[in-house]
Image (tube, rainbow, N blue to C red):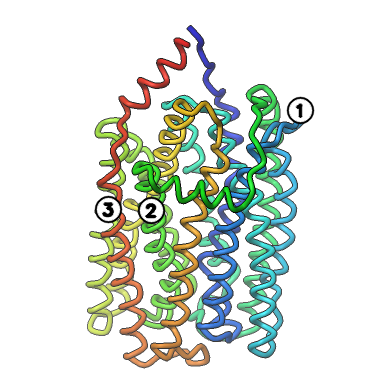
Amino acid sequence: MKQRDNLPFVNKLCYGAGCVGYNSLSQTMNSFIMFFATSIMGLSGSLAGLAIAISSLWDGISDPLVGNLSDRTCNKVFGKRLGYILVAIFAVAFCNILLWSMPKSSQVVMFLWLIFFLLLQETANTFFSTPNNALAFDLAPEYNEQSKLQSFKSVFAIIGMILPSFLLYFFMPSISIGVQTEYTQEGFLTIAYINSGLMILFGLINVLGNLKQARKRNVCEFTPKTSFRKLMKGYFDVFKKSSFACVILGYSTAQIASSLLTSVGMHLFTYCYHFSSAQISILLLCLFGGAIIAQPLWLSIAKRVDKKHAIITGLSVVLMGLGATLITFLFRTYVSNSIIYPITCFTIFLCGMGTGAMYALPISMYADVIAMEQFETGENKSGAYLGYYSFTYNISNSLSLLVMGLMLDLIKFDSTAALQPLSVQSGLGMIVFCGCSIALALSILIFSRYRIKRADVLKIQMRQKIE
């Protein structure tokens, strides 16, 4: 009987810690780049949305290419993935600083700057994130070990996602962030320098901490070079398999809600609730704090009722939190800020608790599907499959970001006005609350069709050990 040793604690710790800098940097970009481009720099919503959408689409296209490239790599020093991760650490850090250094100029110049450096940033991100996600399957292919490793990753990832809230609190003036000043752009640039430093520090911890294990578990299998056309054919073939399709589409749809809540949520809380930058940073802490606190809860629920039911429960909790936040939005003009704010903090914390299920469970479910596919075919295509996973998310994300930008112009959002008309405030509310609710409801419906259970995966892994 063939036994596979468990992954040591220190390797789980190093792998998880490697996500801190990357997630802090990515969350800053995802949460603030639309707001930064429109409200601080004065770029139109349509142009900002177009630039972000194109870069997100490119990110999706590059994911399966880089995933397949890492599958075909067999390096004696860095294994299949760590070489790409090491180079990407420095590329991501450098591009990030240039992105936030946008000059305040004409619409054309700012648009070209934004789209050029976003494309560079997303390319560098792909060479880090896709091999890094696939590395988890190489280090811990066993069912329970994979869940544990993803939990480590989720905790550190959420810590990274919380960091921008602290950085916003300390490096932005405690006034309405909609007021344009040079200091606010300088504050974002300061945050970019800190995030790039964290990216390098924690990225190196991941690479150096897992170097020995990556060599030890580096299985040099022959994986033929695949053209982009074949990769895309493989992508559409994946959707013929219901379990793959459920996880990919369910996750991507849920992330649309997350994107709306963080990106347009900045506009909502600034121009509708009139919260200060310090108050908004605390709201973000409530959101991501709820997610990290809930990690042990969702892991426990997943063990008792399986991952599918746990993730549906989590999405339902987000819907409830969103509904409660809608009530605060409707009564914000009738109740004082001192009352509305703590209630909103609680409702956003509730959203965060539910969102916590989205950080570990979907990728863990996807790992189960890949494990079953690998057992049936005998081929290790985890990198390519993760590329398909990211590709779909980025397509949906690019479309939603484009629509967000167009909607900001459609409701006549004016970045130069600190006080927006009630019609604009209502439009912002509709974008956030209606968009999030629809995306969450669709995600629940899609995940409900997932059919793989724990027993199915454990049965296959037992057969692998026997063989």
In three-dimensional space, the C-alpha distance between marks 3 and 2, rounded to whole angstroms, equals 11 Å
User: Which residue is labeled 1 in the image?
Assistant: 76
Q: Is residue 393 left or right of residue 294?
A: right
Picture disc at residue 444: 3
Q: CA distance from mark 1 to mark 2?
A: 36 Å
In depth, the one of 450 and 411 nearer the eye is 450
Tag 2 or tag 3, which sits nearer the N-term? 2
Amino acid on which disc 1 is placed: Lys
37 with respect to 267 (left or right): right
Let me know if residue 39 appears in the view.
no
Which structural element holds mark 2? Answer: helix
Q: Are marks 3 and 1 in contact (CB under 8 Å)?
A: no
Q: Nearer the viewer, mark 3 or mark 2?
A: 2
Disc 3 marks a residue whose amino acid type is Ile
Residue 249 numbered tag: 2
Task: Using the image, determine if residue 169 lies above or below residue 234.
Answer: below
Q: Amino acid at mark 2?
A: Leu
N-term-proximal mark, 1 vs 2:
1
In this orientation, does residue 305 appear? yes
Q: Nearer the viewer, residue 308 or 67?
A: 67
Q: Residue at x 32, y 28 (%)?
A: 454
State the residue in front, 463 or 51.
Answer: 463
Q: Earlier in the sequence, mark 3 or mark 1?
A: 1
Q: CA distance from mark 3 to mark 1?
A: 43 Å
Residue shown at 58%/46% (left/top)?
19
Quarter occupied by residue 16: top right
Spot the residue most to the right: 77
10 Å crowding of disc 1: few (<14), some (14-19), many (20+): few
Q: Secondary structure at mark 1?
A: loop
Q: Residues within 10 Å of mark 2 (few under 14, many from 20)?
A: many
- The residue sitting at 51% across, 88% down in the picture is 415
Is there CB contact under 8 Å for labels 3 and 2? no
